[in-house]
Amino acid sequence: MARDYYALLGVARNATDQEIKRAYRKLARELHPDVNPDPGAQEKFREVSSAYEVLSDPEKRRIVDLGGDPLESGGGMGGGFSNAGFGGLGDVFEAFFGGMNQGGGTRKPRGRVQAGADSLLRTRLSLQECAVGVTKHLTVDTAILCDLCQGAGTNGNSKPVRCETCGGAGEVQTVQRSFLGQVMTSRPCPTCRGAGETIPDPCRKCGGDGRVRARREIAAPIPAGVANGMRVRLAAQGEVGPGGGPAGDLYIEIVEQPHDTYVRDGDDLHCTIRVPMVDAALGTTVVVDTILDGPVELTIPPGTQPGEASVLRGHGMPKLRATSRGDLIAHLDIVVPTKLDSKQSDLLEKYKATRGNERTEVLSAQSEHNSGLFARLRASFSGR
Ligand SMILES: [Zn+2]
Ligand SMILES: [Zn+2]
């Protein structure tokens, strides 16, 4: 279950970077262990800090917005709270509290092995494919485990050694003067990039990264009922991490192609049927090629009015991960002939003569026929 990082910081899902930073600073000032002795505050501080770590990193925030949790896939190898100093969190601590390591240094080098990044791939699907579900064969450019060193990054039997620049701590510290007095700041070690160790004799194939770029073929199972913009998650099919760390996830985003006949609205399908005036008056039937059930005969009852719709219940799109289906809604476009020959005009004149006092008139505002909108609403509720 992904944590709600936005709620932890008390910001909206569309909050700007500035708003996120401001919310975090405010909470950090209240909750930091140096300021707030309450044991509950410490736990809250950790949560709030991880929320800030995630939401201040565009890549991690994107994962959250996809419904994932960037701190979960890390499996303790990357992205944990103790590593939060990389990429911004450290700055905030230091600006307000003079560095977070002063109490005893709980930070550890992050190590060379880290979780891989998530990837996103888009694929076009026809409406038919969205309705039935399909296995899509896709090609993805990604990072895979280096087969020469199996992720170790070392050449042959050589071993990584402790970084000389940082002594294995993964970070280097400098003392700066600021308006708060002397402030110790720390940043990732430039030599080992936070790993705490270096590889003097790196793998010839991957250069020490433990992974290589490769093109992979993927068979992605797309369930029935997906819609435009939805993302299907393939666990551990993303990039392998540095040092052969666990792979991220691969998300497949659906790009639904327009259909010749149907316009989709959620699980419902809409189409338009042209009905000549006389067919609308006398009633008729028409065969509709449904998306999943083949041809289905639709009855247009006698006296069908302009703006009415016929609904084929349960002939729409399947609902995702459910057995029920949406509806197929046929909007009836009643067509009045524009050109009549003399014989046809005579027939209609004779027809008119049989209709007695039927005539063209202005309706009262209270007339139930007054609004085409009401007629359409009635049609959609009556379910014909
Ligand atoms: Zn180092
Ligand atoms: Zn290698």
Image (cartoon, rainbow, N blue to C red):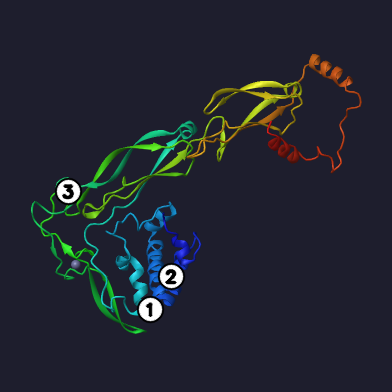
- The amino acid type of the residue labelled 1 equals Phe
Q: Residue at x 71, y 33 (%)?
A: 308
Considering every residue shown, the one lying at the far bottom of the view is 181
Q: Which mark is residue 233?
A: none
Considering only order in the chain, which callout, 3 or 1, is on the residue closer to the N terminus? 1
Q: Which residue is disc 3 drawn over? A: 150
Residue contact at pointers 1 and 3, CB within 8 angstroms = no
Q: Nearer the viewer, residue 247 or 351?
A: 247
Label 1, residues with CA under 10 Å away: few <14, some 14-19, many ≥20: some
Q: Position of residue 130 (x, y in %)?
A: 47, 35
Considering every residue shown, the one lying at the far front of the view is 39
Q: Secondary structure at mark 1?
A: helix
Q: Secondary structure at mark 3?
A: loop
Considering only order in the chain, which callout, 2 or 3, is on the residue closer to the N terminus? 2
Label 2, residues with CA under 10 Å away: few <14, some 14-19, many ≥20: many
Which image quarter: residue 18? bottom left
Q: Position of residue 246 (x, y in %)?
A: 27, 51
Q: Position of residue 97 (x, y in %)?
A: 36, 79
Q: Which residue is disc 1 drawn over? A: 96
Quadrant containing the N terminus in the rendered view: bottom left
Disc 3 beta carbon < 8 A from ligand 2? yes
Q: CA distance from mark 1 to mark 3?
A: 43 Å
Q: CA distance from mark 2 to mark 1?
A: 12 Å
Q: Which residue is disc 2 drawn over? A: 24
Which image quarter: residue 359? top right
Q: CA distance from mark 3 to mark 2?
A: 40 Å
Q: Is residue 75 left or right of residue 3?
A: left
Q: Is residue 347 above or below residue 159?
A: above
